Amino acid sequence: MPVSAQGTPIDRFSLPDDRGHFGPYGGMYVPETLMTALYELQDAYQEAKEDPLFAQELKRHLKEYAGRPTELFYARNLSEQLGGAKIYLKREDLLHTGAHKINNCLGQVLLARRMGKNRVIAETGAGQHGVATASVCAKFGLRCVIYMGAVDMERQALNVFRMRLCGAEVRAVEAGQKTLKEAINEAMRDWVTNVRDTHYILGSALGSHPYPMMVRDFHRVIGQETRRQIMEYENSLPDEMVACVGGGSNAIGFFWDFLEEDSVQLVGVEAGGCGPGPGRHAARFMGGRVGVLHGCKTWILQDPDGQIEPTHSVSAGLDYAAIGPEHAYYHDCGRIRFAHATDGEALEAFQKLSSTEGIIPALESSHALAYAIKRAPQMSSDQILCLNLSGRGDKDVDQAERILSSK
Ligand SMILES: *Cc1c(COP(=O)(O)O)cnc(C)c1O
């Protein structure tokens, strides 16, 4: 069993506490006007969790609509070329809408219906969470409003079109840097005003309690399937598991059922951008410190006055100043180790997986791959490295083409 820095054993089931704390992190740092909505959500989620019919229905939609279970694929060519550990890829990239995000959106849309809400709002950065949310709202017949920074809307015009095709209204946010942080502010403002008929589908294991817990739980299926599959294929647990970390939802879902397995190393990979220094990356454990953002206490990239620092990453999905509170906790305990990959390393990994296996990964997932490409050769050929391939790269090919052809 892993132990905290204080030497006490970790019991993953005891976290968070009923006010949403993971040790010193998490919590509910929101205006009074949102507390009622959050308590209502917490109660509804608790009830749903205890209702076997809810789990059954979610499982059915995950299979029929999203395409679960996803395969755990032995990347033989890549493994043999690198010469070291056997690399397995958890194929979340094969899910409907192209990434793991649909797991959480399906869970939350069922919850919204259960609470009798007929309107859904969400924030989106690159547009992946917006597309997944718009899709489930179309399927379940709920009104859908997506908040997106005006700059992001321009950069991700195709995703805006996808959301609109699915019947969502996309609202441009013109404040501040006009990106994800401002879009979350706007979504929270909308929620305060319309809380009676509106559910807010937050897109990562972030924000105020109960979101970090709830979003994690909806992604746990990734790790549960991985465990079953690797036992079937190798009759052994992996030696190391790797995932990229934006807010941290794909990583915590992948890791969670292995937290108490001492023999399994867990590694989260953040966006190293174009190197160290303020504004040049989004690696919260490289230059960040503890603060509060969007309802939750965690590690944040901020200047000496506590102003949120601008961030940079080639992958929009990792480009956020705060990390999920559960990751902050396991970072401090030493249970999850964190590394980072630069823009350049991620782009190389993006090409490498495409050319060796014919699988084009999302630029986010390419950060985890970049780490694995360095790490696998240091391991022996009877060891196993499992990597969560959080999404597919179709959305990134234009950008990659532009960058690579200008070199
Ligand atoms: C959004 C996204 C991420 C980052 O989000 P997490 O909450 O950290 O998982 C990673 N990979 C892909 C493909 C994404 O779309």
Image (spheres, helix red, strand yellow):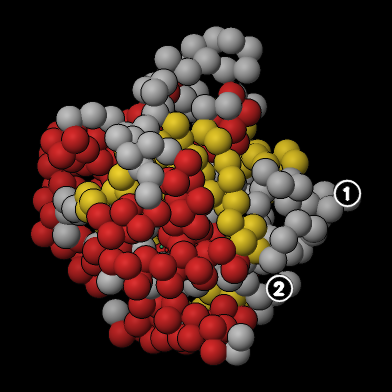
Any part of residue 106 in sight: no
Q: What is the spatial separation of the Cα atoms under label 2 and label 1, in whole angstroms?
A: 19 Å
Any part of residue 264 in sight: yes
- Image: 235 above or below 289: above
Residue drawn at (42%, 81%), measured in percent from left and top? Answer: 397
Image quarter where ligand 1 lies: bottom left
Label 1: how many Cα within 10 Å (few below 14, some 14–19, many 20+): few
Amino acid type of the residue that numbered disc 2 sits on in the rendered structure? Gln
Could you say which is closer to the camera, residue 119 or residue 134? 134
Judging from the image, what secondary structure is the residue with disc 2 in?
loop
**What x and y, as percent, mark residue 321?**
66, 55
Kindly identify which residue carries mark 1.
304
- Image: 387 above or below 174: above
In what quadrant of the picture does the C terminus appear?
Answer: bottom right
Residue drawn at (54%, 30%), measured in percent from left and top? Answer: 330
Kindly identify which residue carries mark 2.
177
Tell me if 310 is positioned left or right of 34 in this view.
right
Residue drawn at (19%, 35%), measured in percent from left and top? Answer: 234
- Image: 130 above or below 341: below
